[in-house]
Structures are given as structure tokens and as C-alpha cells.
Amino acid sequence: GAGVSQSPRYKVAKRGRDVALRCDSISGHVTLYWYRQTLGQGSEVLTYSQSDAQRDKSGRPSGRFSAERPERSVSTLKIQRTEQGDSAVYLCASSYLSGPECYEQYFGPGTRLTVT
Amino acid sequence: DAKTTQPNSMESNEEEPVHLPCNHSTISGTDYIHWYRQLPSQGPEYVIHGLTSNVNNRMASLAIAEDRKSSTLILHRATLRDAAVYYCILRDRAGRRALTFGSGTRLQVQP
């Protein structure tokens, strides 16, 4: 069946502009995650949300990152006032179960963002 | 979060078994041991997880030391498609839901 998809796959943005990255998760999955992956710093979680919350539970201190969930299986990561340090691969993941027993996350292919 | 230590890289020959080690000496009693792998230009994918007992699934086996301070992911017959970065991750059962990735082990498989 269809897995997690992300769009666009590649995005180039000028510094200071806002960007929005989309994730379509697997139908029925409860929790959605956004991770950022860079060569120098590895992977870190940015935010995650459960199905009953449109607003994100942010793991990232900066207020420039936010996630919205307009539909149960859709999430949009918004980055305001992009900086060159935001250049990275942004990964979306979803999981069926909610709570600490959830063990398997399904990842999308990622969006490679380049800020110039 | 408890930390894991993995070798930066390993090499294997096709159709031979591969043992990928992971040290997690500060693991707590409620931490699960998870393994994910990431193929080139793809997102990570779940491989296997365990708590105390050894685990087997269609992709791999997970051998967990008796003191749980280390574990080994076993690929029984490596194929070229197994070339990837393998991440050993501890998952706190108490409530942290996101995965904390380290630098992983880059596995190269030679034909």
C-alpha cells in the first residue's frame, strides 16, 4: 500500500523567506513526527503531534518552526524566516499507535531544503 | 536519554552474515532497543526492536546481552541492498515518543 509521502522532494528558498513542507502519512496513523537531518548534526526531532491535536508538541526551542495538521493524515511543517542553517533534509514519519508502546515509525523519503 | 555507541563503518561480503554491534552501557530498565536503517536517498526504516530477549523477524535478528549493556543486529545473509546506515536507538518506555538518532554504522557490502 501507499507509504508516507512528502512534497516537494527538493526545495530551494531564499534566506528570509517562509517555506511550507507537506507530509501525507499512512491512513489510520495517529502520531506524526518531523525530523531534521544534516550531515554535521545528524538527525533531530523538530515536532510531533497526535491525531487529536492540530497544534504541534514542539521539541525545538526556536519559534520559527511549527507544524499544522489540517487533516488526520496530512501535516505541514512551516519554517518562518529561513536561515542558511536550515538547509537540511526534513523527514516526516508516522506511527499507528499512540503512547510509549508505539515502536515502529514509518518515514517518508524526505524533502531536501536548500536556503541560499 | 541513554546514549548508544556504534562503529562508524563496517564492511561485509555478499551472502555472508553481518554482526553490527551497539553499546549502551547506561541503558535503563525501561528502555527498549530499536534498530532502524537508512538506505541512500531514503528515509529511515524500522528493522527490529527488543527489550531483554533475543528477537527474530524477516529482516534480521537482535541479540541482547544478558546485562543489556550491549546488543548485536544480525543480518544472516547480506545482500547489496543491505548497504545502508544502521542506527541503534534506545526508546524510553516512559513516554518519549520521538527517536533520537546517533551517527550509526555505515555498512558496505561487497559483491
Image (cartoon, rainbow, N blue to C red):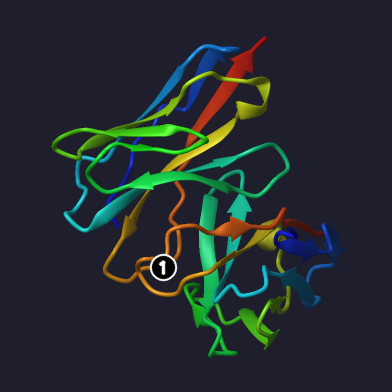
Q: Quadrant of residue A30?
A: bottom right
Residue in the foreground of this view, choosing between A77 and A69? A69
Residue B70 placed where, x, y %? 25, 34
Task: Evaluate whether residue B67 shows in this view.
Answer: yes
Q: Nearer the viewer, residue A65 or A57?
A: A57
Q: How many marks do you count on the picture?
A: 1
Question: Is A109 placed above or below A14 here?
Answer: above
What is the quadrant of the C terminus of chain B in the image?
Answer: top right
Q: Residues within 10 Å of mark 1 (few under 14, many from 20)?
A: many
Residue tagged 1: B97
User: Chain letter of disc 1?
Assistant: B
Q: Secondary structure at mark 1?
A: loop
Which residue shows up at 54% across the image and 29% down it? B106
Q: Residue at x 21, y 33 (%)?
A: B65
Amino acid type, residue under disc 1 in the picture: Arg
In the rendered view, does A28 fall on the left or right side of B36? right
Residue B30: x and y in percent read: 21, 58
Q: Position of residue B28 (x, y in %)?
A: 18, 53
Can you say which quadrant of the picture contains the N terminus of chain B?
bottom left
